[in-house]
Image: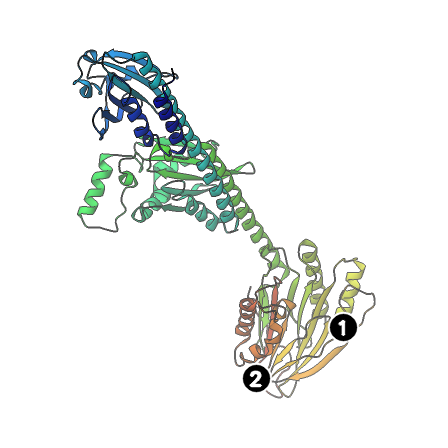
Amino acid sequence: MVDDTWSSALHRLWQAASRAEEVSALADDVYAPLLATPGVHLVVGTRWEDPQILRYMRALRAGSDSPVITATARSVPEAAVREPGDEPVVTRIPVAGLDDAGWPEAELLRRMPEATFVVCTFRLDHRGWASLGVGVDASADVAAVEGRLAQAVDVIVACHTGIIQRGREARRGADDALLAEASLQMDSSLDVEETLRRVARIAVPAVADGALVHLLRSEGPEFVSATHVAVQQQRALEEIGRENPWLAALLARRSEDEDTVFLSGPELDGSPFADTAEATEATEATEADGDGDGARPVAAEADRHSTVISISTLRARGRVVGSITFVYQRPEARLPGSAFLRSLATRAALSIDNALLYELRRHAVLSLQEHLLPSQLPVTDQWDLSASYEVGDPMLDVGGDFYDAVPRPDGSIALLIGDVCGRGAEAAALTGLARHTLRTLLEQGTDPGTALSRLNRALRQERASRFLTAVVATLAPQADGTALLTTCSAGHPSPLVLRSDGTVSEVLTGGLLLGVLDDVSYESHEERIGPDDTVVLFTDGLTESREAGGAFFESILPVRLAALRGFDAAHIAESLTQQAKAYRASGQDDIALLVARWTGVPPGADLLLHPLQLVRTAR
């Protein structure tokens, strides 16, 4: 005959189990139906961690609506023999035969000395086990009671397994989301130290309570960044990462190990992470002294959770780039898995390695760029010369902008500026060819038009696949204290002249691009400039800097230049560069400027170029 009451109760229990977020939520649906079983006077359950640590005990007696709950964490060594295997075990034992040393339930069953304790022990997970038992009198159908216990235990085990699986799925989803966010955050910076700092910030507190990141240098681990959930621990953790010999030695030993290692307990003896009485006493002493800014031992913040650290080697493209050390002061269940830490370390290593490679490339490009530009400009008391160069490409390919200032045998000085189409190695090669060709010709006294024609011929002979623009301007002192400005252009933006009275004019130029057609000739334009007049040559990166609304810097350049009247060449060059950079919402072209202010010479003075000095150009 089917027991409809128990069947209905069991059905409700399964429904509750499917919704429960923790096993203890099933207590009412388990205890009450079992207590309603004929002959049952007491239902008691226990939860154990490891073989002998009793976490809690819950009991409900017939005629009572309030359960007795004992929350504890005491050791019961004799209970270790009760630990079940993989399958539940049902035991019948007379209450009079229960030994208090191994059966904490005995104190609740003493009111029933003639009764029998029917108990089912079962394993919930690898960390512990549980029991569910009833005290029955002689009227009970013990076999039926055992069956109900077994069925209830099945539901409890299934509920616990489901909770663990749902937790794992939620944790996996959270881990995946964290890894994705970490990749985005770390990949968004190409600065090595900023990338390393982001690694630490992303991990805390989502992964750990603290994190230290080290970069591997030839001389050993170099501390870069640390962070901690507790603000007062931030400085202590930084000091550990920067100066602690125990950690430095450990990181050096593990520099080639690929697997993540966890250290705790005695493995941390002698380390700044050890959970020691000395650490706690040191903390209390620091607080007693009233030194609120003192660095407190990290382990002293562990509360009741022992400190655990993990060390993951950061390896990318077959080489070790550093390490990340996580500090945990949380329950074991909240520690991340090795697989997750390996994945995070791999992503961090790739981001760091990319930043390192970018840094190497940046230094190489800047070094090459320096060799394509003059390191020094000539200067005398007749000329105030300066230049400015701003790299616009965030990927730092070598640009094609160039400039130079060349003293000439007749006492004049030649200014040249140009722009090769495109970027990269080929553009760099043409930049070097163009600048050195023009410099050599102009030093020999060749006039600007002829110099540009001969450069065009050289480009055509070399079968250059790129074109370039250039402008050459010569400044020749005159007997009346002025200077003759002779300008020749090959498709380049026209120079501007800032007069001493603040007016700005554009130098008339024309001419075909270099490297396009054979046998091209270039015409020159002449005009006079007076003392304190300034000639400004520039590449299109300046004029084509565009604001968000679409307007070009070219439209306001004359006004901005006029506002710089009275300033020296260095200030004008740097100011215009920075203004264009701040103005620019789009566009990534390099900006090059060459500025020459004619200081003038007294009428009748020696017009030959005065003895030269060299001044370093702005970069």
Residues marked 1 and 2 touching at CB (< 8 Å): no
Q: Position of residue 118 (x, y in %)?
A: 28, 15
In the visual, does 528 lie left or right of 33?
Answer: right
- Mark 1, secondary structure of its residue: loop
Q: How is the image coloured?
A: rainbow
Numbered label tally: 2
Q: Secondary structure at mark 2?
A: loop
Rendered image quadrant of residue 128: top left
What is the CA distance from the residue labelled 1 to the residue labelled 2? Answer: 29 Å
Compared with 518, 566 (above or below) is below
Residue visible at 19% across and 21% down in the picture = 108
- Check disc 2: other Cα within 10 Å, few if <14, some if 14-19, many if 20+: some
Q: Residue at x 34, y 40 (%)?
A: 244
Answer whether residue 172 is visible to the viewer in this image. yes
Q: Amino acid at mark 1?
A: Gly
Toward which corner of the image does residue 590 lie, by quadrant? Answer: bottom right
Which residue: 78% across, 67% down? 454
Tell me which amino acid carries mark 2.
Gly
Confirm whether residue 224 shows in the render: no
- Of all residues shown, which one is farthest toward the right? 519
Q: Earlier in the sequence, mark 1 or mark 2?
A: 2
Please state, as top left, top right, bottom left or bottom right, where the N terminus lies in the image.
Answer: top left
Whole-percent x, y for residue 397 in the image: 62, 55
Q: Eyeballing the image, is 447 above or below 93?
A: below
Seen from the viewer's position, the closer of residues 9 and 305 is 9
Q: Is residue 368 left or right of residue 49?
A: right
Above or below — where is 558 with respect to 339?
A: below
Residue at label 2? 502
Say which mark, if any, is on residue 511. 1
Q: Which mark is residue 250?
A: none
The residue sitting at 36% across, 31% down in the picture is: 263
